Image (tube, rainbow, N blue to C red):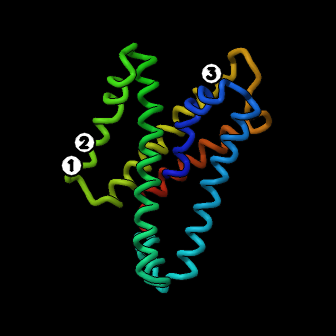
Amino acid sequence: MFAFSAFFSIPQAVTGLNRDTKKIRKAVFLGLMNNLVLIIVITLCSLISSGEVTKMAMIGWSKGIGAWAQVVGSVFMVLAMLTTYWSISLALGDIVQEQMKWGRKACWVAATVPSLLLTFLPIAGFMEFMRLAGGLIAILVAILVVPAYRKASGEEGESMLGRFGTTGMQILIMIAYILMAVGNVVSV
């Protein structure tokens, strides 16, 4: 879920790269490839080193290669969650700012505080909360991203997606997000 929510930081990348299409394509590609490589490495290492299937991959991994891996893995997971949360909160703050015309800090607080408060409510355990949040986000993305792209692609300028922006690819993306939503709510 965290890896695929990285696209929320694309508007900041576009602004930071001065709308240079080549640099934006390269940054998005490298960002997604970095996520893919990390996910594959962590998954393979967890499967190879763990004698049993555990709820958290890092727990099985650390049992297989030593307690130091649990410390390093925990730090990595916290940093991954913080950076993802940070980029998403900044992107949502920008969206609120565009719609409400408030100051940047007020918009960031408005976009960040509600979700932060939800984490402190005793609704469920962390993993159940993440599953539910991942499913809801996947449904929202499946419903909103493709129509937003279709609307934006009708505006002036060249599409950065090229052949990856076709109707077939858009349908495939919606199906993938719906499958991700289903996978997040189905217990394993």
* Rendering quarter of residue 20: top right
Mark sitting earlier along the chain (1/3)? 1
Give the residue at mark 3. 151
Crowd rating for badge 1 (residues with CA inside 10 Å; few <14, some 14–19, many 20+): few
Residue shown at 62% from the left, 65% from the top: 40
Q: Are marks 2 and 1 in contact (CB under 8 Å)?
A: yes
Q: Position of residue 73 (x, y in %)?
A: 45, 68
Residue shown at 63% from the left, 54% from the top: 34
Dot 1 amino acid type: Leu
Q: CA distance from mark 2 to mark 1?
A: 7 Å
Mark sitting earlier along the chain (2/3)? 2
Q: Nearer the viewer, residue 35 or 153?
A: 35
Q: Describe the element under mark 2 as helix, strand or loop.
A: helix
Q: CA distance from mark 1 to mark 3?
A: 37 Å
Give the residue at mark 1. 121
Q: Describe the element under mark 3 as helix, strand or loop.
A: helix
Q: Describe the element under mark 1 as helix, strand or loop.
A: loop
Q: Position of residue 160 (x, y in %)?
A: 73, 31
Give the residue at mark 2. 117
Crowd rating for badge 2 (residues with CA inside 10 Å; few <14, some 14–19, many 20+): few
The C terminus sits in image quarter: bottom left
> Closer to us: mark 2 or mark 3?
2
Dot 3 amino acid type: Lys
